[in-house]
Amino acid sequence: MNCKMSANLKKLKDLVDEQAEDEGLWFLDPLCSEAYLQASLRRLHAEIEDMLEEYKNDN
């Protein structure tokens, strides 16, 4: 595994860990947390897409 891929995997792991610890994602009131949850999922999705695109361009 190259250094860039390792750095990208660490970045994803850090983001996942951050979201796992974010109490805002675990609200009991579904109306309050829905928009916040969707924004967090979009952020994670964007990071994964960017990293996959980088990987594809490097190979």
Image (cartoon, helix red, strand yellow):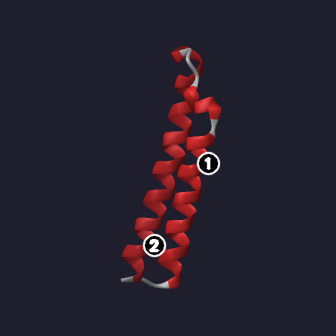
Q: Indicate the amino acid at tag 2.
A: Glu
Mark 1 crowdedness (10 Å alpha carbons): few <14, some 14-19, many ≥20: few
Viewer-proximal residue among 11 and 38: 11
Q: Is residue 44 above or below residue 38?
A: below
Q: Is residue 34 above or below residue 50?
A: above
Q: CA distance from mark 2 to mark 1?
A: 23 Å
* Residue drawn 55% across the image and 42% down it: 20
* Residue drawn 51% across the image and 57% down it: 47
Q: Is residue 23 above or below residue 34?
A: below
Q: Where does residue 43 sit, x and y in percent of width and height?
A: 54, 47
User: Which labelled disc corresponds to residue 54?
Assistant: 2
Q: Where does residue 41 sit, x and y in percent of width and height?
A: 49, 41
Quadrant the C terminus occupies: bottom left
Q: Where does residue 9 sit, x and y in percent of width and height?
A: 49, 67
Q: Indicate the amino acid at tag 1.
A: Glu
Dot 2 falls on a residue whose secondary structure is helix
User: Which labelled disc corresponds to residue 32?
Assistant: none
* Residue drawn 42% across the image and 68% down it: 53
Say whether disc 2 or disc 1 marks the residue closer to the N-terminus.
1
Q: Quadrant of residue 48?
A: bottom left
Between label 2 and label 1, give the one nearer the viewer: 1
- 39 sits left or right of 53 in the view: right
Dot 1 falls on a residue whose secondary structure is helix
Q: Where does residue 1 sit, x and y in percent of width and height?
A: 42, 83
Q: Give the labeled residue for mark 1.
A: 18
